[in-house]
Amino acid sequence: MSETFEPRIVAFMCNWCSYAGADNAGISRLPSPPNVLPIRVMCSGRVSPEMVLRAFRSGADGVMVLGCHIGDCHYIDGNHRTIKRMPLVRNLLGYVGINPERFVLDWVSSAEAPKFARVTNAFVEKIRDLGPIADELGGGA
Ligand code: FES
């Protein structure tokens, strides 16, 4: 009766680096998990804590924010804003009863297709170990 748990992952990726890195991973045929729903944003600094919470509320078991490396942001300092905001996201997740380990922030450039594959595969496995978010929230999600 037990089914294999396939995590649902939402990945916010900035247009200029991470989304291009994901694209290149696909072009290079690197093994990437099918569990990841990519959401392209112009800059990782565009991702608000509310957007992350909304992704969880919509059924995501894990959420990723992927942006340009520090110093490479297309908008100069957009990812500095990301760095400042994401600790707040972790605090909010803890406050609403979601394990903050279900959220990750990382930097992936357009030239880092192998890194994209590595971080997404590792995150999917981590969330697979944590189990469905509905279990964590008492099955009521
Ligand atoms: Fe990529 Fe700002 S454009 S993080």
Image (tube, helix red, strand yellow):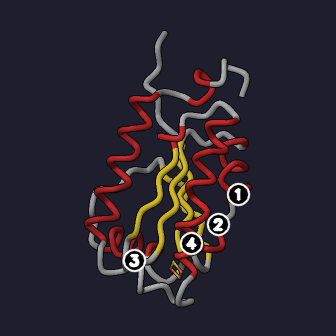
Whether pointer 2 and pointer 1 mark residues with C-beta atoms closer than 8 Å, the reply is: yes
User: In what element is the residue under mark 3?
Assistant: loop
* Residue assigned mark 1: 51
Q: Is mark 4 within 8 Å of ligand 1?
A: yes
Residue drawn at (25%, 66%), measured in percent from left and top? 114
Question: What is the distance, in whole Å, between disc 3 and disc 2 at their CAs?
Answer: 16 Å
Residue under numbered circle 2? 47
Rendered view: 105 above or below 21: above
Vertical placement of residue 39 versus 20, above or below: above
Earlier in the chain: of badge 1 and badge 4, it is 4
Q: Nearer the viewer, residue 101 or 62?
A: 101
| Alpha-carbon span between mark 4 and mark 2 | 6 Å
Front-most of 86 and 139?
A: 86
How far is mark 2 from mark 1, CA to CA?
A: 6 Å
Residue to which mark 3 is pinned: 69
Q: What is the C-alpha distance between the residues marked 3 and 4?
A: 10 Å
Q: Can you tell which mark lies on residue 44?
A: 4
Residue at 68 percent of width and 36 percent of height: 95
